[in-house]
Amino acid sequence: MQIYPEALNGCTEYNIENIAKILEQQMALAGVTKEMLAGKKIVLKPNLVMSKNPDFAATTHPAVIAGAARALRSMGSDALLLAESSGGPYTETTIRLHYNGCGIKEIAQQENITLNYKTGASTMQFPDGAACRSFHVIQPICDADIIVNICKLKTHSLTKMSCGVKNLYGVIPGTEKVEMHARFSRVESFTQMLCDLAQMLLDNKTMITICDGICGMEGNGPTGGTPRKYGVLMTSLSPFSLDLLAEHLLGFNGTVPSVQASIQRCVFPVDIAQLTIAGTDYKQHITANVIPPDTSRRSILRDFPDLFGGRLVRFLEPRPKIDQKKCVGCGVCAASCPQKTITIKEQNGKKRLNVQDKNCIRCYCCQEMCPKNAVKIQKNFILRLVR
């Protein structure tokens, strides 16, 4: 087992010049060298989950992308390509929409970053996968020598936290992510699949993971939560060990499923005390009282997932519900649902959408992709009484 050093520094403002200096120092501390970068195909992979202004804190801030580009060039990199498959179809139209809406097009022109508009993909094999042994991956990632995984520090309704490992889910093309949710319908199998994907990419590519934790998200992330200032930048050659550190910064110690799955695989030390952390003391940057997603209460159910044939867990689990006052009937939630459980009916000249609970797998894709934040998490009244 290789132990990767993590680099962590405080950073409270989206100042490109300052971010570039910090990231250059962090890359050196984390083990990135000029020789490692020289002549390599480098792809920047941000989090552009939906077309939202960076101020919403749902996507990687353009200033961090610009800072990473400057840091890489100062270390000898030349051509930089940015690629991402966000929510919705993997088409040129959707890609352009996200680049424009997330402030990427402007920063790419400023920093001479090439933007990917091609929509090809190839299959990568992973015979050692615990849950998944092959993945369909967007072509720029397949062709890359080095992946610069620029994630956003956020809470997440399904996985509790989105950081280095979860951000790599964006290499799956478009609506194929919906199919993966249907295939891995329980959070345990889904997070095992995420770990397989991250390990496959690590085995085949050099990966530099950078975390935009300057302003992240709490509550019902990854898109419907509230911005929260965490004031940190982090860099690592392993998304697994960076996530272990991030879990502690949020105060979610031992409760993030993907981190726990990674620990079971022994892909990094099982305790944060065993990590090598360069820069500043991480304890100075632990954020108190981070609000978890409403769905985090489901974690107490994992101790007895098969009790009464799993019916008790299904009855108690938080479930998505459409807020009809906010819903505009756009149908994005229905298109994002792996099980096609969302119905659309017209009433008094207005489209009304409803989640049919029978086949809902609690993936919360509908909440994640709703552009109007109209999908809420309805908590079971018994769990509310217990709380």
Image (cartoon, rainbow, N blue to C red):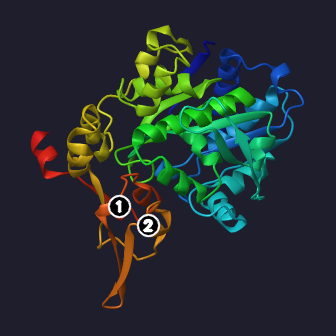
N-terminal-most mark, 1 or 2: 2
The residue under the point 78% across, 45% down is 81
Looking at the picture, tell me which residue is in the foreground, 84 or 358.
358
Q: Is residue 7 above or below residue 207?
A: above
Residue 14 in view:
no
Image quarter hosting the N terminus? top right
Seen as rendered, the residue at the extreme left is 385
Numbered label attached to residue 340: 2
Q: Residues within 10 Å of mark 2 (few under 14, many from 20)?
A: some
Residue 205 shown left or right of residue 212 in the figure: right
In which quadrant is the C terminus drawn? top left
Nearest to the observer: residue 242 or residue 302: 302
Secondary structure under tag 1 reads: helix
The one of 95 and 18 positioned closer to us in this rendering: 95
Q: Contact (CB < 8 A) between labels 1 and 2?
A: yes
Q: Is residue 221 above or below residue 72?
A: below
Q: Position of residue 84 (x, y in %)?
A: 67, 50
- Residue 275 as seen in the image, left or right of residue 354: right
What's the amino acid at mark 1?
Asn
Q: Quadrant of residue 348?
A: bottom left
Could you classify mark 1 by the number of other residues whose Cα lies within 10 Å: few (under 14), some (14-19), or many (20 or more)?
A: few
Residue at the spot x=78%, y=58% of the render?
Answer: 118
Q: Residue at x 47, y 31 (%)?
A: 231
Residue 156, given in percent of the width and then of the height, sits at: 41, 44
- Which residue occupies the extreme bottom position in the image? 349
Nearer to us in this view, 14 or 42: 42
Residue occupied by mark 1: 359
Cα–Cα gap, marks 1 and 2: 8 Å
Instruction: Name the residue at the right extreme.
Output: 39
**Element carrying mark 2:** loop
Q: Is residue 70 above or below residue 105?
A: above
